[in-house]
Image (cartoon, rainbow, N blue to C red):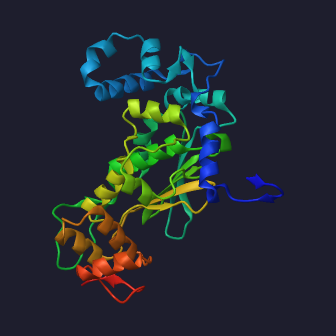
Amino acid sequence: MRIGTSKTKLKDNPELERVLWLRQTDWSAETQPMATIDDLDPTAIAKARSEFAEKNRTARDEIDSWDDATFLNKAKLTIGGRVTNAALLLLGKPESAALISPAVARISWILKDDDNVEQDYAHFGPPLLLQGDRVLEKIRNLTIRSLPSGTLFPRELSQYDPWVIREALNNAIAHQDYRLHGRITVVETPEQLMITNVGHSLPESVEQVIRQDAPQEIYRNPFLAEAMVNLNMIDTQGGGIKRMFRTQADRFFPLPDYDLSNPERVVVRIPGRILDEQYTRLLMGKPDLDLTEVMLLDRVQKGQRIPHEAHRKLRAKGLIEGRYPNAYLSA
């Protein structure tokens, strides 16, 4: 933003940033005058009905009696029968992507090898409600057989938990800044998945989201976010990202990494391999560790510095060794 004759980063002025976000219009709630319900995919509408009924179990009989127009209004996908950008994103027929142009409704899956050379790719457009499973079908979710020496897993583990992938992907759909005309990407390498959406993150850090354990105050696409909640795609109660981290910890895997350093995009990396056997042993041997401690241990295994006070507490509990700022996991 510009202050007088000089420019400064918006993220360095959180109060002004908040005011601007509150003032902006919601792109996802805008209606398309040329669009009708006929531009929506019948299979996607049926899936939406099923998920809406699952979310509202006490009203299932009533939901079954609604025609499509009534259902779409109730599910907050249309406004007075007018088709919104959110409806076209989630339920639109493939060709309906032209109706929201120059915005881009596309998820691109890219497979790369150890040398970062592209091996395969696929693109997925509307209806995005149905594309999560199709992206999952592309990802090679191999079984991990490299076990920590002297230990046994209680079961064979796949590289990725499907729920974690869906949550990260659906969050990208919900928080994408569609005005920037970018796509969502899922890059698969032998070691990790990297999911990227354009537009900077509204929370200051993922630690803040997990710590407050409450709904976000501001959403980039509030109409789209509410529709996705109604269709069981995301959780706005503040528990989605926390559950992602908890799920990875329960599988004894490294935690997701959120890279918010670029103001134009958010990058989520989901590790698909064990980084430090001692980290896995600690999680297996100490199931009572709270998530904050697990997050700190995860930073230690990744060679990242932790706060001095946290270093002192973890060392006192025998979880790490080394004099600050150096730290390594206790053997």
Residue farthest toward the bottom in the current orientation of the protein: 323
Q: Position of residue 224 (x, y in %)?
A: 51, 33
Compared with 12, 72 (above or below) is: above
Q: Position of residue 11 (x, y in %)?
A: 62, 57
Q: Position of residue 190 (x, y in %)?
A: 43, 65
Residue 121 relative to residue 272: left or right? right
Viewer-proximal residue among 295 and 12: 12
Viewer-proximal residue among 247 and 306: 306
> Which residue is found at the position 17% from the left and 72% from the top?
285
Q: Is residue 31 in view from this perspective?
A: yes
Compared with 17, 255 (above or below) is: below
Residue 302 relative to residue 249: left or right? right
Viewer-proximal residue among 125 and 113: 125
> Which residue is found at the position 40% from the left and 86% from the top?
326
Q: Position of residue 241 (x, y in %)?
A: 38, 51
| Image quarter of the C terminus | bottom left
> Which residue is found at the position 60% from the left and 33% from the top?
26
